[in-house]
Image (spheres, helix red, strand yellow):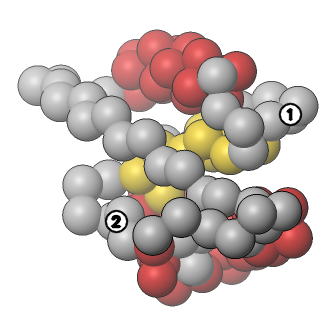
Amino acid sequence: MRPEPGTKELIVWEYDLTFNDIDQDLVPYLLQCLQKACTHADGVAWSAFEGAFHFDHLFAEYIAGQIYGYCVVGGDPVMVWDGETLESDQWKRCISDVRSTVDRDFL
């Protein structure tokens, strides 16, 4: 089903990255991947752990701990690689703000 003329269309591309070693040294590479994805996106690019994606959960606060990076077009990528920070109220607010951007600009 195609959207009505004049309405916005949400397009999602998924890329699966698999690593044998996921230590802190991986963060610069992940930031580069996120920046490149955001450069080619028309909205928001994000990184999340396996199983965190579903349209109903897109940037939902209750899965914020599963989203470890995001980039809104025109901004710098944000990456968190610390479990305590991923579970913090501050991170939940950041993810909620991204959801607000998606709702406002892309849905």
Task: Mark 1 or mark 2: name the one nearer the start of the chain.
Answer: 2
| Furthest residue in direction front, as rendered | 5
Q: Which residue is mark 2?
A: 52
* Callout 2 secondary element: loop
Would residue 21 be found to the left or right of residue 28 on screen? Answer: left
* Residue at x 48%, y 49% (from the top left corner): 12
Along the line of sight, the residue nearer the viewer: 107 or 16: 107
Along the line of sight, the residue nearer the viewer: 83 or 35: 35
| Furthest residue in direction left, as rendered | 20
Task: Residue 54: name its quadrant.
Answer: bottom left
Which class describes the residues within 10 Å of circle 2: few (<14), some (14-19), or many (20+)? some
Locate residue 78, reporting x and y percent: 69, 39
Task: Residue 25: name its quadrant.
Answer: top left
Marks 1/2: CA–CA distance: 23 Å
Task: Residue 101: name its quadrant.
Answer: bottom right
Q: Which mark is residue 87?
A: none
Quadrant location, the N terminus: bottom left
* Residue at x 60%, y 81% (from the top left corner): 61
Q: Which residue is mark 1?
A: 75
Task: Give the vertical position of 37 relative to 46 (above or below).
Answer: above
Indicate the amino acid at tag 2. Answer: Ala
* Residue at x 83%, y 62% (from the top left corner): 6
Locate residue 11, reporting x and y percent: 54, 50
* Residue at x 25%, y 36% (from the top left corner): 16
